[in-house]
Structure formats: C-alpha cells, structure tokens
Image (cartoon, rainbow, N blue to C red):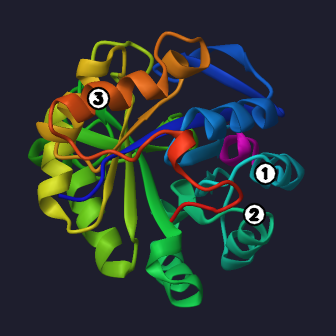
Amino acid sequence: MLTKRIIPCLDVDRGRVVKGVSFVNLRDAGDPGELAAFYDREGADELVFLDITASSDGRDTMVEVVERVSSQVFIPLTVGGGIRSVDDMRRMLEAGADKVAVNTAAVRDPGLIELGAKEFGSQCIVLAMDVKRVERPLGVLGDSRALAEAPWQVYTHGGRFPTPIDPVKWARASVELGAGELLVTSMDSDGQKTGYDLELLSAVSRAVSVPLIASGGAGKVEHMHDALTVGMADAALAASVFHFGELRISGVKSFLGERGLPVRHTPGERSEGARWS
C-alpha cells in the first residue's frame, strides 16, 4: 500500500491565510510564510497553497507570496488559484512550486490540462474541483439531464459559480487529458468539522487511477482515517484544525499508523536540507 499523506492547506486572501465555513465567513489564520515553516517542522508530507480570490478577482496568483512560502519548506508544494495558462504554470514552478493546481481555467478550457501535462509532465498537474451537492430544482442551470444524473455539481471561481458538470465524469476526463492528481473539496463539508464527503470521494476515486486528495470536513483524526479508507483517498488535506491547533500532524500520523495505515515518519527521521519526493 502506498504511503498516505497528510497535507495542510494555506487558503490565502490578500497575502494572509484565512479559513471559513463552506467558503464564507473567512477569518484570519496567520502569515503564510510562518505557517509554511511551522508545517515543514511538524512533519507535513506536502503543502497546498491556494490563492482563493485570484480567479474571482481576475488577477494572477501572488508570486512573491509563493516565493516566500516555498523558501520556508523542504516538502512538495502545490500552488493554485488564478492559473490560466502554461505561462502561469511556469511562473509558479519557477517561484518554487512542485505542482500547480487548476480549477476554473480548466473548466473553461480543458485543453489547458493537456498543454500543462505535455510541457511539465502529468506529475506537475493537479486538477482541483470544488463540489457541492445538488439541492435545487432540476433545470435551473439549463441542463436538467446532466444534473439528474449526478448528486453533485462542480463550482468555479472559488466556489462562487455553479456549473452543470458532474465531478466524477470531470475527474475521468481530466485524467485522460493528463492530470496526474486530483484535489476534491466538498463545499458542503468545508469547515463544518463533521467529516469528509465519503460518498463523493469514493465515487471519484473509483473512476480514476491517479492519486486523490480529500478536502473539506476534517474535525478529528477519525475523519481523516475514514477519508483514507472508506473514501479511498491517497491523502487527507485539512486547514483550520491545523491552523488553530485543534490537531497536530504528529498526532494524526500516530493515530493512522496504529490502525495499520502506512505514513511517513515525523521530521526527526528525515535528513535536513533534502526535499521529500
């Protein structure tokens, strides 16, 4: 069994890490550079940096903040938000990212995934999707047939705009185009601390052969265990429970390891100055 990963997420707005509930009511969680350094010391397996207002504001990802974050970590860094072209991807990789995540731009132009994979390799391209359960009359979005077939729909622009896209079909299509990893966030569960959407995770996981990162809903270690087992995810991502000290990465890994899941050891057992792969 492949090693399961624990990934803190830095949702950044105007240069500060923020966290809300179901993508609203954001509150400040700290400086991204300081948090990145803290999670590197804590033994995080990777770090995800999302500029959550870049797409909705129509601006580019903040390169200087990405550079500051990447300088603080020796673990893989994924950067997303406002990435609209291969040039944007290159800019983030040159700023220190190991992988780039695309969401809104890929929905608009799926060919961006293919172009990025050809230029940098599939291992560098992460498809991120914000997903919400369908709770409105069929046909409101103009495609009742699509909505009738799926209990979820994909949202764009930081969760602001719904689409008629079925996340399972979109996951499968993105992998065929070259995406090497998926980051699936349940908007319904985000910040609720009641657990990940296990049905969504397992449905997407069964549809693809690439690694899946579970996002949205972590409140306790049992939730992460469920995401990695029942949800069939390869990694569990969390934000507020780590930012505000409710959970420690070492504690999560101990819990998972005691239950038979393979996890990487904590910082004392890795060599200093070497980036994990």
The reply to whether residue 193 is visible in this rendering is yes
Residue 96: give its label.
Answer: 2
Q: Amino acid at mark 2?
A: Gly
Residue 58 magenta: yes
Please name the residue shown 40% across and 22% down the image: 251
Tally of numbered discs: 3
Please name the residue shown 45% across and 27% down the image: 250
Give above or below for 249 relative to 60. above
Please name the residue shown 47% across and 28% down the image: 249
Q: Amino acid at mark 1?
A: Val
Residue 207, position in %: x, y? 15, 61
Could you tell me if the residues under marks 1 and 3 are in contact, i.e. CB atoms within 8 Å?
Answer: no
The kind of secondary structure element at disc 3 is helix
Q: Which residues are magenta?
A: 53-59
Judge the density around disc 3: few (<14), some (14-19), many (≥20) Cα neighbours within 10 Å: many
Could you tell me if the residues under marks 2 and 3 are in contact, i.e. CB atoms within 8 Å?
Answer: no
**Is residue 77 toward the left or the right of residue 22 in the image?**
right
Q: Amino acid at mark 3?
A: Met
Quadrant in which residue 134 is drawn = top left
The reply to whether residue 166 is visible in this rendering is no
